[in-house]
Amino acid sequence: MANFNAPANIAELVISKVGVSKCKLGFWHVMILGILAGAFIAFGAQLATRMGAMITFDKGISALVFGSVFSVGLMLVVIAGAELFTGNNLMFMSVLNGDAKISAMLQKWIIVFIANFLGSMLIVFIMHQSGLVTGDIAEKAVKIAAKKVSLEFGPAFFSAILCNWLVCLAVWLALASHDIVGKIFGIFFPIMAFVASGFEHSIANMYFIPIGIFNDPTGTITWAGFFNNIIPVTLGNIVGGAGFVATLYWIVFKKRELK
């Protein structure tokens, strides 16, 4: 017996567990798990910011470590259990297969997106009040946020496609494994790759940009800049996850079964 799920079996799991079962979750279950996911991703983001501020002798090593430590966020989401908007883009496979209604999926996406923001802002607030975001770390947080809010719509959108293509592949690989170690390795490499590459993740940016706003001494990083980033990044994330992962794998593994 194989110690992992083959791609066709993963497709079955995505349809039944990621799609159908998530559509059946009650409002408060989704809200609480969504807040947790936002907090978990923010934990990874704050750690990445700290490490990025500390490693200044080599940009390549800094990017690699930044991406590596950020991966703890999705590990917490997948293994501990939480509802993350970007990962939930895989629910679209259940809609394509006719096992879930698009209205139910969109409803859950909206609730999870809002809950993710609340969870992210909770960690932003606690980190700001803790006094841990000071000096070089605060400067790094401001630098990250400033870069993100300066992105034009097109670059933000296309970078976000690449991001969630990898994030949803990380979830896909985690579903391939039957054990915790396998799930960790399945998550680590795609997440490290997207972060080290500088791609845009809507939920991560719910931490990166607000913490920059709170620590910007010039006041040039604004909430208007936050929304100018979040809108194209969210749209790009949907295309990357629902389009390049859910749709393409559904065509390969499930569409023929409906004929």
Image: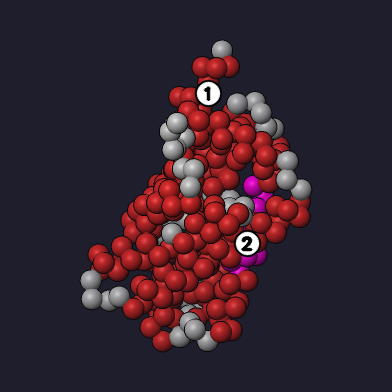
Disc 2: which residue: 36
Amino acid found under the numbered disc labelled 2: Leu
Q: Quadrant of residue 145?
A: bottom left
**Image position of 31 with respect to 237: above or below:** below
Q: Residues within 10 Å of mark 1 (few under 14, many from 20)?
A: some
Secondary structure type for disc 2: helix
Disc 1: which residue: 254
Residue 62 magenta: no
| Quarter the N terminus occupies | top left
Q: Answer yes or no: is residue 236 visible.
A: no
Q: Residue at x 65, y 56 (%)?
A: 34
Point out the residue furthest to the front here.
1
Secondary structure type for disc 1: loop
Range of magenta residues: 109-121
Residue 103, image x and y in percent? 71, 37
Ranked by sequence position, the earlier of labels 1 and 2 is 2
Amino acid found under the numbered disc labelled 1: Lys
**Image position of 257 with respect to 233: above or below:** above
Q: Quadrant of residue 65?
A: bottom left
Q: Residue at x 44, y 81 (%)?
A: 138
Q: Quadrant of residue 12?
A: top right
Q: Is residue 152 left or right of residue 116?
A: left
| Quarter the C terminus occupies | top right
Q: Is residue 89 left or right of residue 35?
A: left
Task: Measure how far apart labels 1 and 2 are at the Cα level.
Answer: 32 Å
Residue 149, image x and y in percent? 46, 65
Residue 86, image x and y in percent? 54, 49
Q: Residue at x 61, y 69 (%)?
A: 121
